[in-house]
Image (spheres, rainbow, N blue to C red):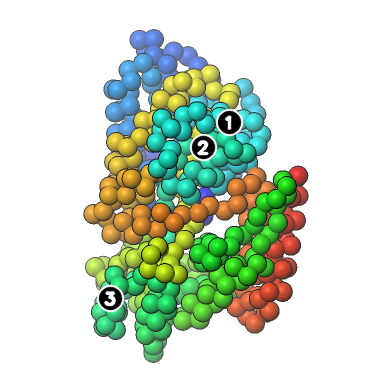
Amino acid sequence: MKLRLFAGVSVLVTTVGLSACSSSSDASDDGPGGSSTIDVWLMRDSVSAQFQTDFVEGFEAAHPDIKVKVQIQEWDGIGEKVTAALASNDAPDVIETGNTQVAQFAQSGGLLDLSDKVDELGGKDWLKGLAEPGAYEGKQYGIPYYAANRVVIYRTDLFKEAGIDAAAIKTRDQWIAATEKLNTGDTQGIYLPGQNWYTLAGFVWDEGGDLATESGGKWKGSLDTPEALRGMEFYEKLQALGRGPKDSDEAGPPQADVMAKGKVAQVISTPGGAGTVIENNPELKGKLGFFPIPGKTAGAPGAVFTGGSDLVIPTASTKQDAAYTFIKELTGDTWQKKLAVAMSYVPNKTTLADAVAADPGAAAMAVGAAEGHATPNSPGWAAVEAKNPIKDYMTAVLTGGDPRQEAVTASEAITTAMNSGS
């Protein structure tokens, strides 16, 4: 989900010239010259005002029979707002939604099934971390829009002083060895707070485990499996090579602020975090680099949580054909390449990764995105994140608790939360 993924990413977005329309009631009227007007909800900070303007102007020029009205939505409270819109007769025609939110909206029956459009949209090449959560019960409702994931942001000068070539770090063992070498004196080899659960999820997926599994229509927390326990074991080993707090996540204190103080060699973050570091300490400009989170072997990068957005069409939309045309253009190769360059995002298809080759941070993300995953694809996952027993589990283990027993407790809490509404 984008709201959590991009915490700390500095993107300047203005909304000058955006439509202030509040619903599709305005869009139900024909536009000038007999054109059809569609109402589109996009999320704040997803794209710059300039990209949005360029796309809308380009789209309307290519499709003179369709006009576009965009309303920018806030991430806070968006779930309730979309749910209400889908249940009404006054829904917008296109909605941008966090990729992990699609299942809860699809469950209500308020989204248009786009399964028959997958091939036409190049679905075989979609990033699975966007495509999989965009589907629900075997049907595709969400069309992948853009992605971002975590990478390692590192101090190039500290690596050079230690004689470490970041480009040569391809495996977890090599990463640990380098981090041990960097963790000396008052310099932390890595700043990794104890509750960075998205990072833990990647290690669990690397081991072949998952946060929860489904069988017979019921979900069960699975942090207590041998695979998931191995993922936590690696997290504990890596976290010990720094002085990150064991009882908070990357927002408390903001890890970019910590790195800006000059005594941290690495953090795990989206690339935009580097900009925040430099804003806080301009002396670090030119001293930050990026590499994909390493995997267990050199054959593949580490698994990562893929955050980002999908685009959906409400069943209540009266302009579904025009809405689909809008989505087809915005998620097509031409505009995906432009979006990736403009926003340093990962395009929605693996075949488009070269579009960000000149952007070091985005290029590192694109490598990791090939091993992207999403959280369990269930409407019940929102209840897990609301209380997040995974964070409590991580802190318990890092402060001396028995890993297996703490994992059992967390898994039971996940099971209860995911099945509470079934």
How many residues crowd mark 3 within 10 Å: few (<14), some (14–19), many (20+)?
few
Please, what is the three-letter code of the amino acid marked with disc 2?
Answer: Gly
Amino acid at the residue labelled 1:
Leu
Q: Amino acid at mark 3?
A: Asp
Q: Which mark is residue 142?
A: 2
List x then y, in percent, for residue 58.
29, 28
Callout 2: 10 Å neighbours few (<14), some, many (20+)? Answer: many
Q: Earlier in the sequence, mark 1 or mark 3?
A: 1
Query: Mark 1 or 3, which is nearer the eye?
Result: 3
**Image quarter of residue 326:** top left
Crowd around label 1: few <14 · some 14–19 · many ≥20 (10 Å): many
Q: Quadrant of residue 294?
A: bottom left
Q: CA distance from mark 2 to mark 3?
A: 40 Å
Q: Is residue 417 visible?
A: yes
- Residue 68 quadrant: top left
Name the residue at 69% across, 65% down: 410
**Res. 165 mark:** 3
> Circles 2 and 1: CB distance less than 8 Å?
yes
Question: Which mark is drawn over residue 53?
Answer: none
